[in-house]
Image: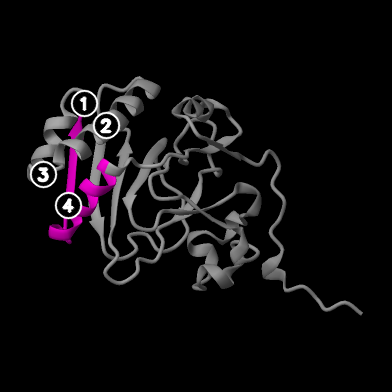
């Protein structure tokens, strides 16, 4: 007789499950507008100059957090000021400005909410969905965001539905093999619960555990009113 399968491992199948889109060019971002998509990932490798600038910044800036409203035209100078105009700040600022310009162009926004910070611990250690239309996220150095494909999630176990159990034991997902992870440098668009037509289908994700003395430098962009 086969051993009984624990009920918490049985993730119910979802009708019209959302899919992920992964590409090697930012042109993939247009697929975010597809109703059945809840994450689009641009897999990119940071160039040597950018990686060196980020590493240089983190050697002296263990604690850093900047939250601001930016436009495509204001981002470069705003980020340089926030970073402190060190050698290499211009390289980081150019990349952030590029992402802001792409984000605003894709969604026809005049401005965006920017959060740029060094993380020494998991900011959101439990799997969750965002109550936003869309969030851009990228990790310049360190471990990157973990996420679950829609087909692998039992959404009834999110939030209070976990009944106080940790994610691994709540039945939210079948096994640790279901957990996917962005790579350093990847740029991802995460569709949230407030995107029209995406109620109860926002991307389920969490911050990864941060190893001692290996901080993350992470950027997020959001819609703002």
Q: Nearer the viewer, residue 39 or 192?
A: 39
Which secondary structure, mark 4? helix
Ranked by sequence position, the earlier of labels 4 and 2 is 4
- Magenta-drawn segment: 49-70
Q: Position of residue 65 (x, y in %)?
A: 18, 52
Q: Nearer the viewer, residue 91 or 216?
A: 91
Q: Position of residue 182 (x, y in %)?
A: 46, 50
Ranked by sequence position, the earlier of labels 2 and 3 is 3
**Residue with the mark numbered 2:** 112
Ranked by sequence position, the earlier of labels 1 and 3 is 1
**Residue located at (55% from left, 70% from top):** 168
**Residue located at (24% from left, 44% from top):** 115
Question: Do tag 2 and tag 1 residues touch (Cβ < 8 Å)?
Answer: yes
**Residue located at (31% from left, 38% from top):** 221
Which of the image's four quarters has the C terminus? top left
Query: Which callout, 4 or 1, points to the residue nearer the camera?
Result: 4
Say whether residue 50 is magenta: yes
């Amino acid at each position: 007789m086969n051993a009984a399968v624990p009920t918490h491992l049985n993730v119910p199948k979802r009708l019209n499950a959302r899919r992920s889109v992964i590409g090697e060019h930012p042109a993939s971002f247009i697929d975010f507008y597809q109703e059945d998509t809840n994450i689009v990932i641009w897999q990119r490798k940071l160039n040597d100059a950018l990686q060196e600038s980020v590493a240089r910044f983190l050697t002296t800036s263990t604690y850093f957090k900047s939250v601001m409203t930016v436009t495509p035209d204001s981002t470069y100078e705003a980020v340089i000021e926030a970073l402190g105009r060190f050698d290499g700040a211009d390289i980081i600022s150019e990349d952030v400005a590029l992402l802001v310009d792409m984000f605003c162009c894709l969604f026809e926004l005049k401005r965006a909410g920017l959060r740029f910070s060094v993380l020494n611990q998991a900011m959101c250690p439990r799997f969750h969905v965002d109550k936003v239309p869309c969030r851009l996220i990228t990790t310049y150095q360190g471990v990157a965001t973990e996420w679950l494909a829609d087909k692998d999630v039992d959404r009834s176990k999110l939030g209070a539905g976990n009944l106080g159990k940790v994610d691994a034991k709540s039945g939210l997902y079948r096994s640790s093999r279901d957990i996917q992870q962005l790579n350093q440098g990847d740029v991802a668009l995460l569709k949230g619960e407030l995107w029209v037509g995406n109620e109860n289908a926002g991307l389920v994700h969490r911050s990864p555990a941060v190893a001692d003395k290996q901080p993350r430098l992470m950027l997020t962009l959001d819609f703002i009113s």
